[in-house]
Amino acid sequence: MEPTYRAEPLPEDAGSVRRIVDGTGFFRPDETDVAVELVEERLAKGERSGYHFWFAEADGALRGYVCFGPTPCTVGSFDLYWIVVDTAWQGAGLGRELMRKAEESAREMGGRRIYVETSGKDLYRSTREFYLRVGYREAARLADFYDVGDDKLIYEKTL
């Protein structure tokens, strides 16, 4: 079944986000909690939260999502906070389409550039390769940022 997309979160998305983020096996419990908190923040405050989303659904379930927003204290810079695709749907183009929707939305909101950060651990190699495939470039590397041996990599793309 082809996925459908929507920008507005629903109350049940908090639990669905937890399910797909946990299901990747990439994130610690505290990181998963942050992903859920961003959905809850948007539900509570609307656009004032600064968090924007695209959700992809198929077969009656959430299959992927992206969260992004303007970078505080900048003009035209956006952060991509989360992009997660259900493991059963990875490789089907869902991540690419979610990224395209986030970038298009950011551009419509005055975005000039979008930034995303990720871990330098081997576990995140496929994530880094994905960012390169969709047109991002590595802009910075901060050694031992997350932990000893776990660099922070920052990717950027001009919109």
Image (spheres, helix red, strand yellow):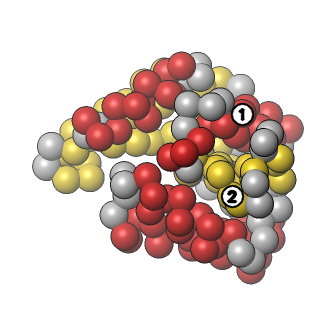
Q: Residue at x 13, y 49 (%)?
A: 148
For residue 38, which quarter of the picture?
bottom right
Q: Residue at x 44, y 42 (%)?
A: 117
Residue on which the image places disc 1: 97
Viewer-side residue, 17 vs 60: 60
CB under 8 Å between callouts 2 and 1?
no
Horizontal side of 126 relative to 157 (left or right) equals left
What amino acid is labelled 2 in the image?
A: Leu
Q: How many neighbours does mark 2 have within 10 angstroms: few (below 14), some (14-19), or many (20 or more)?
A: many
Residue 66 point in image, percent of width and height: 65, 49
Using the rendered image of the protein, determine whether residue 62 is visible from the camera's viewpoint. yes
Whole-number angstrom distance, CA of label 2 to CA of label 1:
15 Å
Residue 16 point in image, percent of width and height: 62, 67
Residue projecting furthest to the left: 148
Using the rendered image of the protein, determine whether residue 41 is visible from the camera's viewpoint. no
Give the number of the mark in front: 2 or 1: 2
| Residue 106 disc label | none
Residue on which the image places disc 2: 62
Q: Quadrant of the C terminus?
A: top right
Q: Quadrant of the N terminus?
A: top right
Q: Determine the secondary structure under disc 2.
A: strand
Viewer-side residue, 75 vs 9: 9
What amino acid is labelled 1 in the image?
A: Glu
Q: Residue at x 43, y 25 (%)?
A: 129
For residue 15, which quarter of the picture?
bottom right
Q: Residue at x 83, y 47 (%)?
A: 4
Disc on the earlier residue, 2 or 1 = 2
Residue 113 point in image, percent of width and height: 65, 31
Q: Determine the secondary structure under disc 1.
A: helix
